[in-house]
Image: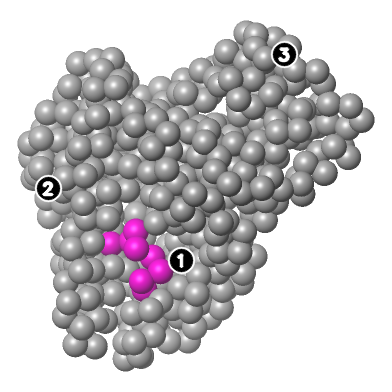
Amino acid sequence: MKRFTARYFLLILPSLFATGALAQAPASHVAETASRAARKTPPVVSVAQRLFGAIPLSTQSGEARKFIELAWDKYENSMFDDAEVNARHATEKDPHSALSHALLSFVARRGIPNSAALAKAKSLLPRTTTDEHLLVSWMTSIQERDLLPAIMNMNDLLKRYPKDKHVLYLTAEWLYLQQHYDRARTMMETALQIDPNFPAVLNRLGYVYVEAGEPANAVASLERYAKVEPGSPNPEDSLGRVLRTSGDDRGALEHFGAALQIDPTYFASQMGLGDTLTLMGDFDSARKEYDRAFQIAENPRDQLYTEFQKALVFFWEGNAAEGRKELAALSERAADKKEPNMQFAVALGRAMLAANSQDELEQLGALAAFLEQPLAGMSESDRGIARAAVLRERVRVAALNGLSDLAAGTISKLEGLAASSPDLVVGNAYESARGFALFEQHDYLNAADELAADSHSPLALQQLAMAQEKLAKSDAAQSTRTHLKYQRGPTVEWLLVTHPEIGNSH
């Protein structure tokens, strides 16, 4: 079965990935016509008021433009809190700048959604320039899960600016987050041809390469990133993560430490120390690093995350009973803080690590009910992905325990969710759920086809390798297990893959 939303990417973006297509594709007039219809006369734009010297902006405030560019730069370099601060400054310098508000909401979606900024950006669309209209419409459509208009707008923007590295990266990052890895890689490598020292691409490509089983290319890309941005902690943090994924824990600790030398409050690297020590089996030291991370966390979500990872240490060290007590208590604290993203993460982890399959299915049912309606503080896109993750896990457990009717009924719900969702991640969850069910029905050929859709899930990859072995495809199984190796991390799924005795559904 083909992935649900992949058809949109295949139908609308194919020319962008052909050799030379970016440089020669004619400009589309679809979004341009719509934007012109939305306003009578485009504002006059001075040369100085162009985003990174390229896209004309409607704002006449030089300070607003500078804050937009600074926020954009911070976003590209994964400094999301700083990006949000600068985007907010841009809205203050020019309250009528649609792009300022769009960027603020676009950045905030990585944490706590900003619906007010999103609404303001949409209301200001008639004041934008033609190309700014495409960019703002793309950002707002992404947040509203309106995939087709989003792709059309970005498609037109790419045709207008085929050699703009920022536009290329923004599109590539979106494709990457939608798990369209091959296309994301192609676009990033195209951007790197334009600017071989573009920090954002050097960073993201490091992750793309390691997931593709190319650790040497990953490290080389990130080492270039570190040379280009020597005063930033993020290159060192990225090197730490990639080295840990490929099994070099000592190297990872060195780079996380180097990041903290640059910025002692860099939360990601402080967590990186705890996570790496956990994987190394140095549990006492890991707990101390998590405690330090808690102290420098700047919001309740990060604090809860440190507590979650610390609670998982009990499972890693073989004390599941104590771990379940900790997760139960943490679940209550997350509910008290009304932090829906961590409520979900803790509840899902707690369910997957439950003492038996009946307890897990009951907890998954309660979590599904919690996610049924929109939640303040959780974007609709994140809620859809969370619902899909819960339903897929329910299918996996039901199938492994011979509950075929429950598995079939849950697959039907997941199918409806995938059909109505523009998120490729949701479609992948539906397909891998079918794969788990088909495997238990001994339909290994179709199971393998479905499980292959979710290449970012250690549990799905493990099951895929088993299906390929059943089909006597040893080479394919070995390739899958190699890919699985590079999913290594301090996650619940990796814990279940590497410690099968903890799982309740085997």
Q: Main secondary structure of the magenta part?
A: loop
Quick one: label 1 or label 3, which is nearer the N terminus? 3
Q: Quadrant of the C terminus?
A: bottom left
Residue 247's disc is 2
- Taking the image as shown, residue 37 lies to the left or right of residue 203, namely right
Res 237 → quadrant: top left
- Give 357 or 214, whichever is nearer the viewer: 214
In the image, which is nearer the foreground, mark 1 or mark 3? Answer: 3
- Which residue lies under the disc numbered 1? 428
Quick one: label 1 or label 2, which is nearer the N terminus? 2
- Give 374 or 248, whichever is nearer the viewer: 248
Q: Amino acid at mark 3?
A: Ser
- Give 96 or 223, whichever is nearer the viewer: 223
Residue 31, above or below 297: below
Q: CA distance from mark 1 to mark 2?
A: 27 Å
| Disc 2: CA contacts within 10 A as few (<14), some (14-19) or many (>=20) | some
Quick one: label 3 or label 2, which is nearer the N terminus? 3
Residue 201, above or below 177: above
Helix, strand, or loop for circle 1? Answer: helix
Residue 62, above or below 143: above
Helix, strand, or loop for circle 2? Answer: loop
- Taking the image as shown, residue 78 lies to the left or right of residue 231, namely right
- Is 157 one of the magenta-colored residues? no
Using the rendered image of the protein, determine whether residue 264 is visible from the camera's viewpoint: no
Residue 37's disc is none
Q: CA distance from mark 1 to mark 3?
A: 46 Å
Q: Amino acid at mark 2?
A: Gly
Residue range corresponding to the magenta coloring: 451-458
Colour pattern of the rendering: one colour
- Which residue lies under the disc numbered 3? 46
